[in-house]
């Protein structure tokens, strides 16, 4: 059974939400689970398999984000923040080791360019 690691806060150009981000190296899959700031509930997971996506890359501007295009019409941007405007709204823990591991996986095993 694959194990997914706990992830970080998400943002995109149109909507900011909270996600739990996980990944599986063997299957080259990233999973994101929408959640709420206090982690009291979550939605259905979305799976992004390397073999099924259009493209994926790291975007440095305007914020450091991991961008995945599952098709030509939509995308998801995973931002790893170490700051938040209102910390009361979020459960946040520093995850330097997890972010480093995810970055390594994304850049070396998942990114398409």
Image (spheres, rainbow, N blue to C red):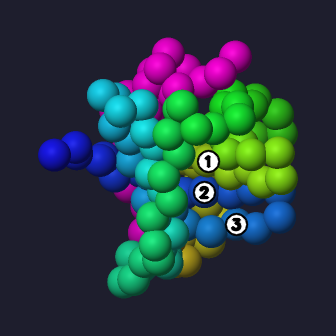
Residue 78's disc is 1
What x and y, as percent, mark residue 3? 22, 45
Quick one: SS at disc 2?
A: strand
Does residue 41 appear anywhere in the picture? yes
- Other-residue count near label 2 (Cα within 10 Å), few / some / many at <14 / 14–19 / ≥20: many
User: Is 108 displayed left or right of 73 in the figure?
Assistant: left
According to the picture, the residue beneath numbered tag 2 turns out to be 10
Q: Is residue 105 magenta?
A: yes
What x and y, as percent, mark residue 106? 51, 27
Residue 16's disc is 3
Q: Are marks 2 and 1 in contact (CB under 8 Å)?
A: yes
Q: Are marks 2 and 3 in contact (CB under 8 Å)?
A: yes
Q: Residue at x 47, y 20 (%)?
A: 109
> What is the magenta segment's predominant secondary structure?
helix
39 to 19, vertically: above or below: below
Q: Nearer the viewer, residue 85 or 102?
A: 102
Res 84 → quadrant = bottom right
Q: Residue at x 16, y 46 (%)?
A: 1
Quick one: SS at disc 1?
A: strand
- Other-residue count near label 3 (Cα within 10 Å), few / some / many at <14 / 14–19 / ≥20: few
Name the quarter where the C terminus is drawn: top right
**What residue span does the magenta drawing correspond to?**
91-113
What x and y, as percent, mark residue 103? 49, 28
């Amino acid at each position: 059974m694959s194990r997914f690691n706990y992830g970080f806060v998400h943002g995109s150009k149109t909507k900011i939400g909270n996600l739990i981000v996980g990944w599986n190296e063997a299957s080259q899959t990233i999973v994101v689970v929408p959640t709420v700031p206090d982690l009291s509930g979550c939605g259905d997971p979305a799976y992004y398999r390397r073999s099924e996506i259009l493209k994926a890359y790291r975007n440095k501007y305007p914020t450091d984000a991991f961008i995945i295009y599952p098709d030509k019409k939509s995308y998801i941007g995973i931002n790893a923040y170490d700051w938040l405007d209102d910390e009361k709204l979020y459960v946040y823990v520093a995850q330097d080791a997890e972010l480093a591991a995810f970055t390594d996986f994304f850049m070396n095993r998942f990114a398409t360019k």
